[in-house]
Amino acid sequence: MHTTKLDARFGTRLHLGTDALLDDREREELRGHYAEHGLLVLREGEISDERQIDLMAALGRIEPDETGQPMRMEVTNQHDQTTAPDGELVFHYDYAYDPAPIQGISMYGSLVAEGATPTCFANSAALLSRLPASLVERLRDLEAAHACFLYHPDHPEERNDEPEKILSRGEAGWGPEHYWTHHPAIFENEYGVETLFLCLQHTDRLIGLPRSESDGILEEVYRPLYDPEFVYEHAWQPHDLVIWDNLTVQHARPEPRAPARTLRRYHLSRVDLTADYLLVARERGLV
């Protein structure tokens, strides 16, 4: 196993060198590359479900489905059981609005036509070294409120207010209006990597500040975070596998293109949360 430089400001190209499942030494080596780079790109031919699961299992707990098997999902424009909504998705961490956001994500290009929609990535951990030290120190003392749905679909200029009482996931009456939580603006992932945790799609405000002041700070953060010079755009090819740390690396989908794209997904999570969200989302016609 070794790495080579990726044409990006962060991440690395990972070369496994074998089709065999990982041994203990290789698992430890994989964890080291993952902790260091936050994003791994494999482009070495066809990868089976078993192989993808083996790689992810080396990095943590794969969220299971209702049968107890690793939860296999698809992000696709080929059928209506896709696990992602239609249209453009701006930069976000998956489940940032849950008290326990998932830790890591893997997506494999099982069907990729020429010109398929890319996926863009921005590194929140690396940003900390580019922000003014005074701003970083201020953010250390702040928490942020995150929501899945910040705007009314029919009035995008209006913000949805945080409910006075946020029901816990799965409680009777729980639904999209309760997809809110609070997280520190800066924290460490399980590898001790310090990371910013603010994103365009889900972060509503910095708690305890006037709205105008919070908006100003978020703008000061987002400008360098999403600077195209520091964004990695992954142009999918058939059989690509991309693995990233969902707490240190954000992702986005530009306006979708017509060519076929089906990405097979397994992700890491300490808790079982996806079934709850998908049930409500499909009941409400959100995905």
Image: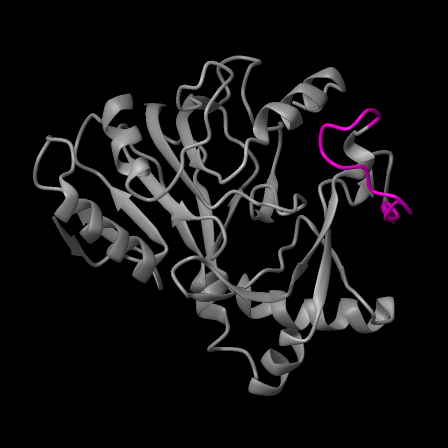
In magenta, the rendered stretch is: 157-173
Total tally of numbered discs in the picture: 0
Q: Nearer the viewer, residue 193 or 107?
A: 193
Q: Is residue 99 left or right of residue 53?
A: right
State the residue at coordinates (46%, 14%): 67
Q: Is residue 188 left or right of residue 171?
A: left
Q: Nearer the viewer, residue 286 or 174?
A: 174
Examine the residues drawn in magenta and state their main secondary structure. loop
State the residue at coordinates (46%, 31%): 63
Quarter of the image with the C terminus is top right
Quadrant of residue 7 within the rendered picture: bottom left
Q: Residue furthest bottom?
A: 134
Q: Position of residue 286 (x, y in %)?
A: 71, 24
Quick check: 160 above or below 258?
below
Q: Position of residue 116 (x, y in %)?
A: 41, 30
Q: Position of residue 180 (x, y in %)?
A: 75, 45
State the residue at coordinates (23%, 28%): 51
Observer able to see residue 6:
no
Q: Position of residue 56 (x, y in %)?
A: 32, 37
Quick check: 106 above or below 123?
above
Q: Nearer the viewer, residue 283 or 130?
A: 283
Quick check: 70 above or below 32?
above
| Residue 32 is a magenta residue | no
| Residue 164 is a magenta residue | yes
